[in-house]
Amino acid sequence: MSWQADKPNQESTSNPNEPLTQQLTQLNQTLTELRNYQGTQIQLQSTAKTSLDQQLHQIEQTARQVNQEFQMTLNNLDSNNASSQAQLKQTLQNAYAVFQKQTNLISQQNLTALKQIQTEQGQNNQRLSQLSDQVNQTIQETMDQVADQVDQQLQATKKRFSWYEIKNYLLAVIPTGILTGLVFWLLTRYFS
């Protein structure tokens, strides 16, 4: 038996690690892309929400101003003559109705846009959840492969050490046993 048989083969242990390294690199790239995608989505949603909030605030301010002006005009009409007062009052009421209709329409459009953003956010959350599940699965598979490789290497090392210990034991015990037997034989033969 030669000492070369006890040395591990260096080439065979480096090949199984290459797919693992590639998988870990691919996993790192996927996580980076996932983080960048999530950041972009959050930024877009925040910009859209800010824009809608500003539009809604402007509409509310305009509505308050128009209501105040209509109320002042209606109050002034009370003091004017009765014949033109009815006509002006009707015109202002019609204008106010049109204004309310437009305000409600814009509010509905904003609500629709907000619902659409909420739907898209839900879809993005679902995609992120799927990506997270895939990443977790890949990590679990990679960890299982690493554990299997480590176990195989430990078993091979244990086997090599076992045979190595047996060989060394036999190499030490047999010559010692032969020498001990020879010494006792010589002692019993010449001193008995």
Image: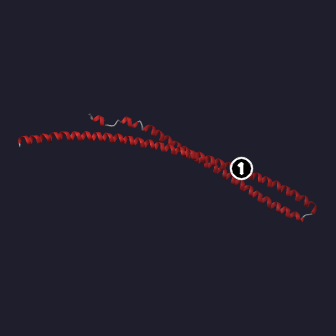
- Give x and y (percent) for residue 72: 83, 63
Q: Residues within 10 Å of mark 1 (few under 14, many from 20)?
A: few
In the picture of the structure, the residue carrying the numbered disc 1 is 112
For the C terminus, give its image quadrant: top left
Image quarter of residue 133: top right
Q: Nearer the viewer, residue 6 or 25?
A: 6
Q: Nearer the viewer, residue 149 or 102?
A: 149
- Residue drawn 45% across and 40% down? 20
Q: Is residue 129 left or right of residue 166?
A: right
Q: Give the number of marks.
A: 1
- Residue drawn 73% across and 50% down? 109
- Give x and y (percent) for residue 182: 12, 39
- Residue drawn 32% across and 40% down? 159
Name above or below for residue 75 compared with residue 35: below
- Residue drawn 44% across and 37% down? 18
- Give x and y (percent) for residue 108: 74, 52
- Element type at marker 1? helix
Q: Is residue 64 left or right of residue 151?
A: right
- Give x and y (percent) for residue 62: 76, 57
Q: Is residue 42 left or right of residue 61?
A: left
Q: Nearer the viewer, residue 169 or 118?
A: 169
